[in-house]
Amino acid sequence: MTPRFLMTDPAHFEVAYVINPWMRPDAWRRDPEGNRRAARAAWEALAAALRGAGAAVEVLPGAPGLPDMVFPANAAVVLDGRALLSRFRCPERRPEEPRFWAAFQALRARGLLDAVAALPEGVFQEGAGDCLWDAARGHFWAGHGQRSLREAIPYVEAFFGREAVPLELAAPRFYHLDVCFCPLPGGEVLFHPGAFTPSALGAIRARVPAALRIEATAEEAGLLCLNAVAIGRTVVMARASARLRALLAERGYRCVELDLSPFLLAGGGAFCMTLRLDLRAAAPPRAAPRAAPVPLGA
């Protein structure tokens, strides 16, 4: 199956408010037109890199006043043709919910998805940003403690019939799991230990052998290069450190580094800017998937 990603056109992207510690509206305002041009170029480079790695890209229009729609990773968790749509904690992003609902219904009508549902209101869970599928282990890693609630995890497990391992995030800087944690196709996990509570680190170390753990420094995590998209042995990411490039190359990965600086001003990188639609689990679910509490069409 061809890897397939959802991206949102960046025409309405800007950094207009602060809802995470990375966001710099002051830097955006110093040169808004230049930043818009740079954002378009960076977005096109990412789309080209995905296509160059053999992927197809579905493009969703953005909307005025919703600059963070450009980060569709936060819109839903998708696996086995089933999409569970997010509930956003921050009021600035909640108007995105009906637009993503309509977009995912359109994807279902085209046969790209089989089922679409949403979490109950107030059950905050921000999509693949806080729920990463680990194909090597057959379970989700579920971030919580910043923008997503631990109480949302059972809904994810019920909807997909898959285990979701809770990982508590320790600091606002690491507001989503995907900015500090990246499962790779070969079974390795690239992560920054300082992003997690001791219990979360214990869960990672209990499930991922030391030989498969790639630990990034705080400085490397600060480049937002852990917010990466892996397609086979190609890893598409913001510019990384020489050390991380070498570690990934030793394990057989080819790094495609991009200048994503306009999006880094909003706290997002390559993974945030995409949502993979075709992920399939290799084994049957441990439990029969169930409908989420909000039915189709609600």
Image (cartoon, grey):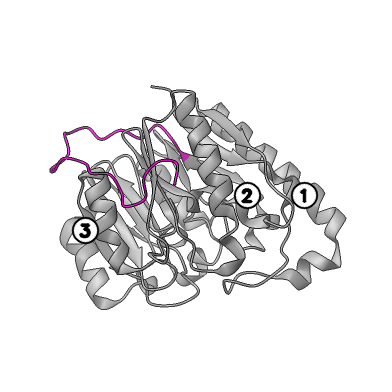
> In the image, what residue type sits under mark 3?
Ala
Q: Name the one closer to the observer, 216 or 98.
A: 98
Q: In this view, does 78 lie to the left or right of 31?
A: left
- When the figure is inspected, residue 203 is found, relative to residue 233, above or below; the finding is below
Q: Give the range drawn in magenta.
A: 276-298
> How busy is the neighbourhood of tag 1: few (under 14 within 10 Å), some, or many (20 plus)?
some
Q: Earlier in the sequence, mark 2 or mark 1?
A: 1
> In the image, what residue type sits under mark 1?
Ala
**x and y, in percent, of residue 208 in the image:** 21, 55
Residue wearing tag 1? 38
Point out which mark residue 210 bears. 3
Residue 213 visible here: no
Q: Name the one closer to the observer, 76 or 238.
A: 76
Q: Distance between the residues labelled 2 and 1?
A: 14 Å
> How busy is the neighbourhood of tag 2: few (under 14 within 10 Å), some, or many (20 plus)?
many
* Label pair 2/1, CB-CB below 8 angstroms: no
Q: Main secondary structure of the magenta part?
A: loop
Image point (85%, 68%), residue name: 30
Q: Distance between the residues labelled 1 and 3?
A: 39 Å
Q: Name the one closer to the observer, 218 or 230.
A: 230
Residue wearing tag 2? 70
> How busy is the neighbourhood of tag 3: few (under 14 within 10 Å), some, or many (20 plus)?
few
Front of the two marks 2 and 1: 2
Residue 227 visible here: yes
Front of the two marks 3 and 2: 2
- When the figure is inspected, residue 140 is found, relative to residue 110, above or below; the finding is below
Q: Is residue 221 left or right of residue 296?
A: right
Q: Earlier in the sequence, mark 3 or mark 2?
A: 2
